[in-house]
Image (cartoon, rainbow, N blue to C red):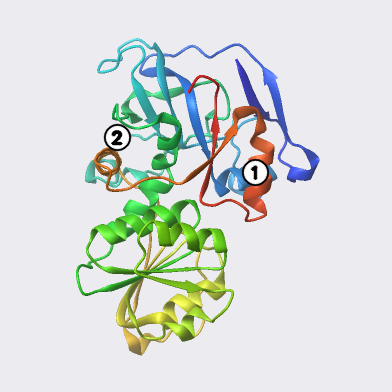
């Protein structure tokens, strides 16, 4: 098989990914082998490849194949695996494995499992032609979904769904989505499904056009106006997916008293206005039950991904465009034949 191998994290300009041939892996007990159709390109991949997370133990091995939002077809079954057949369309999200026994795993919050293994960070991911997956964390993709376009459902999709799920909003409420890249364009759609009015906030003209296409109630161009001032005290809830203290400050300024901010990125807050009784919540991914709901909604045509396709071998170019902020929403690396 051919795959992008990362031996030593380094800036993209130093070409740290090596496109090379290795034997295809063999599934162990409880595992499946997936012939990869598509793998989304996430900013987390960029952090892993460029070494931003080395102090936190990521990547956990060398070499490693990056990529954690993967779709494909079952190409092999390990001992004891049931419920899958060769050729089944499947997908894998960042949660490659969890312990199944801790308080988080047994309460529907497995994304918080302290022993979790992350696809493409602790184990080989989807930047190649084949990958291994843990069968218990492999999801069947509905037959009516395009496998390549479905890949972002397994990170932006589940992340956006998990963030919106933490809000108590509905018709008559106003929700702001700050940052409309891969995750933001999915969160916008899930927020619209609640019946709330959804305000899309971004600097990129491409991102704003996508938000308009997806049905955003209102568009705010953050390159032209200060969104905190323009939306001051007008949002019942805000979702932030841009890792910027300025974005966080604008979102809090836009929130009404008692409003809720859900952040899918690190947050630094200074001079927090405690007298406004605003709530800040963090959100990361979602459970397997949540993933099944995301796939159902996509299958029913209620949400969709917006993707730019690249050949699998062209991962460095997709990453370069991501770093430069020049993607519409999500890049997906596709193997031939899908």
- Report the residue that reaches farthest toward the left: 171
- Report the residue that reaches farthest toward the bottom: 275
Q: Nearer the viewer, residue 98 or 251?
A: 251
Q: Nearer the viewer, residue 145 or 228?
A: 145
Circle 2 sits in a helix, a strand or a loop, which is it?
A: loop
Q: Nearer the viewer, residue 325 or 5?
A: 325
The residue mark sitting in front, 2 or 1, is 1
Say above or below: 124 vs 180. above
Circle 1 sits in a helix, a strand or a loop, which is it?
A: helix
- Measured from the top left, where is residue 181 in percent x and y? 50, 55
- Residue 185 horizontal side relative to residue 276, left or right: right
Q: CA distance from mark 2 to mark 1?
A: 34 Å
Q: Which mark is residue 157?
A: none
Report which residue position mark 2 lands on: 100
Tell me the residue at 62%/43% (across/down). 48
- Residue 180 horizontal side relative to residue 23, left or right: left
- Measured from the top left, where is residue 86 in percent x and y? 35, 11
Q: Nearer the viewer, residue 232 or 195?
A: 195
Residue 95 seen from this side = no
The quadrant in which residue 89 appears is top left
- The answer to whether marks 2 and 1 mark residues whose Cβ atoms lie closer than 8 Å is no
Tell me the residue at 69%/20% (across/down). 20
Precedes in sequence: disc 2 or disc 1 = 2
Report which residue position mark 1 lands on: 319
Say above or below: 139 vs 46. above
Tell me the residue at 55%/72% (across/down). 245
């Amino acid at each position: 098989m051919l795959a992008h191998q990362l031996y030593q994290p380094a800036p993209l300009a130093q070409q740290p990914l090596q496109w090379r041939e290795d034997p295809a892996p063999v599934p162990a007990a409880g595992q499946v082998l997936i012939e990869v159709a598509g793998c989304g390109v996430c900013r987390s991949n960029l952090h892993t490849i460029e070494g931003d997370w080395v102090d936190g133990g990521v990547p956990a091995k060398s070499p490693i194949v990056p990529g954690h939002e993967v779709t494909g077809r079952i190409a092999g079954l390990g001992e004891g695996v049931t419920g899958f057949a060769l050729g089944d369309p499947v997908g894998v999200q960042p949660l490659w494995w969890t312990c199944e026994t801790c308080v988080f795993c047994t309460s529907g919050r497995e994304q918080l499992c302290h022993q979790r293994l992350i696809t493409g960070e602790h184990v080989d991911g989807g930047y190649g032609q084949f990958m291994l997956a843990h069968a218990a964390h492999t999801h069947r993709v509905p037959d009516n979904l395009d496998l390549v376009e479905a890949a972002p459902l397994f990170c932006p999709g589940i992340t956006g769904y998990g963030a919106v799920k933490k809000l108590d909003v509905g018709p008559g409420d106003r929700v702001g989505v700050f940052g409309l890249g891969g995750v933001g364009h999915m969160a916008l759609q899930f927020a619209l499904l609640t019946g709330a009015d959804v305000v899309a906030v971004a600097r990129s003209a491409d991102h704003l056009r996508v938000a308009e296409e997806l049905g955003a109630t209102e568009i705010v161009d953050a390159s032209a106006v200060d969104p905190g001032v323009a939306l001051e005290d007008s949002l019942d809830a805000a979702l932030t997916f841009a890792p910027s203290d300025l974005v966080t400050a604008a979102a809090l300024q836009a929130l009404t008293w008692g409003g809720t901010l859900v952040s899918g990125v690190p947050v630094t807050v200074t001079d927090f206005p405690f007298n406004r009784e605003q709530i800040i919540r963090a959100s990361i991914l979602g459970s397997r039950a949540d993933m099944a709901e995301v796939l159902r909604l996509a299958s029913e045509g209620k949400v969709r991904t917006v993707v730019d396709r690249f050949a699998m071998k062209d991962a460095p170019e997709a990453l370069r465009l991501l770093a430069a902020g020049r993607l519409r929403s999500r890049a997906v690396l596709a193997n031939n034949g899908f």
